Image: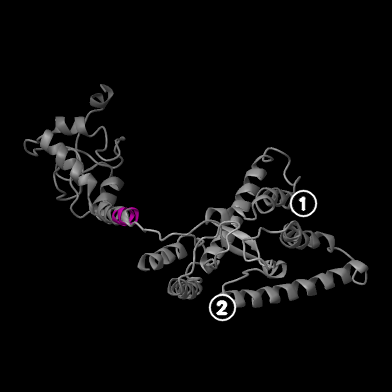
Amino acid sequence: MTNAIVACQSSSHKLQPANGREEQSMLGSFLMRKDMELLYSVYDTGGDMHFTEGSSSAITPVLRISQLDAFELDRALEQLVWSQFIQCFQHFKPGQLTHFEPELKAFLQLLLWRFTIYSQSATVGQSLLSIRYKNDLSQAQKYQLMSRQQKLWYALCTIGEKWLQERSRDLFTNRPTESAFHKAKYSIGIICGLTKAASLLNFLIFLQKGRFPTLAERFLGIRAVFSRPQGIRQVGFKYMNRELLWHGFAEFLIFLFPLINTRKLKSRLYSWFSPHNGFKISDATLAKQCRECALCGKWPTLPHTIGCDHAFCYYCIKSYSISDMYFACPKCALELQKVEPLKLQIEMTDFNKS
């Protein structure tokens, strides 16, 4: 019994959409509570969980969260198919499919309906969750598939409704106010408003009863049931624990890396392998080192020194010294003592030799 409750909790959080999770938390908690009550009632009454075709056993209703997850999977599949279809015409002239977009979407949805609902009495999302539709109008106790009329009416109520809503926007634009088109638009608007209100009322009843999440299912008398026996699932947490440990380690590295002064570490390692014997400044050494900035590697602009044999651009050393109070020379690892201009009398012949 405990494993079944854990399975219900894991499935309720598995397929929530990425957008608006915080807004759906209260609805998810309500559905989890109702589904747990359903599981308790099933196990207390000894309900049979075998739902194969032709079975005369008692049919246990599908969890509410599973029915809603199936709808989310179906929407994701329709968006994926449409995006792949659009990519086939990405090299054509832009706007060619705009006028026929509602018809093309309806055609693709009809193809999905032909190979899912019409042939298997289940959508793709329901098949992934081991769910399919049952003819609830049949008086027989055995499992009955959807009738042919129910399948055709299902296509009309789902695909036809979406096509009519999208196409009506173009049909009734730029029409005279007193024309028949305007009256038809007004009538369709009233019908759509009443349909949405009825859908909202039906959804509230679904949250309470757990049956018929859409108005089309209630109107056609089709109900979602399990397509194969549902045993008690053993939920493993190895993958979840591994993901939690990895994310925790990654967040720790993201916090740690900005605290490491890589420039100072690099200069320290450089000084270990190339030890500097004193910091006595000589004209010949400075003439050699003054040809490039120790930070940017270019000819130093307004050359300055920090007390070692290396020269720096004024803007380079000033910006680095302000950002890092423990700045050290990247060449010899000498810590910053004082930034002062480099004063030398160097003949131009020394530079021309390079």
Q: Earlier in the sequence, mark 2 or mark 1?
A: 1
Q: Nearer the viewer, residue 336 or 180?
A: 180
Residue span colored magenta: 239-245
Provide the residue designation for mark 2.
208
Q: Secondary structure at mark 2?
A: helix
Reply above or below: 82 against 50.
Answer: above
Reply above or below: 51 against 288.
Answer: below
Residue 262 at what x, y percent from top left?
Answer: 23, 46
Q: Amino acid at mark 2?
A: Gln
Residue 302 at what x, y percent from top left?
Answer: 29, 42
For residue 174, side relative to residue 86 (left or right): right
Q: Nearer the viewer, residue 179 or 105?
A: 105
How many badges with numbers are in the image? 2
Q: Secondary structure at mark 1?
A: helix
Marks 2 and 1 sit apart, C-alpha to C-alpha, by 37 Å
* Mark number displayed over residue 34: none
For residue 24, side relative to residue 277 (left or right): right
Q: Would residue 243 be counted in the magenta stretch? A: yes
Q: Nearer the viewer, residue 274 or 201?
A: 201
Question: Which quarter of the rendering shows the C terminus?
Answer: top left
Name the residue located 59 percent from the left edge and 61 percent from the top edge: 71
Residue situated furthest top in the rendering: 353
Residue neighbourhood size for the residue with mark 2, other residues' Cα within 10 Å, grouped as few (<14), some (14–19), many (≥20): few
Choose mark 2 or mark 1, whichever is in front: 2
Reply above or below: 157 against 340.
Answer: below
Residue neighbourhood size for the residue with mark 1, other residues' Cα within 10 Å, grouped as few (<14), some (14–19), many (≥20): some
Q: Main secondary structure of the magenta part?
A: helix
Provide the residue designation for mark 1.
103
Q: Would residue 349 be counted in the magenta stretch? A: no
Q: Amino acid at mark 1?
A: Glu
Residue 141 at what x, y percent from top left?
Answer: 62, 66
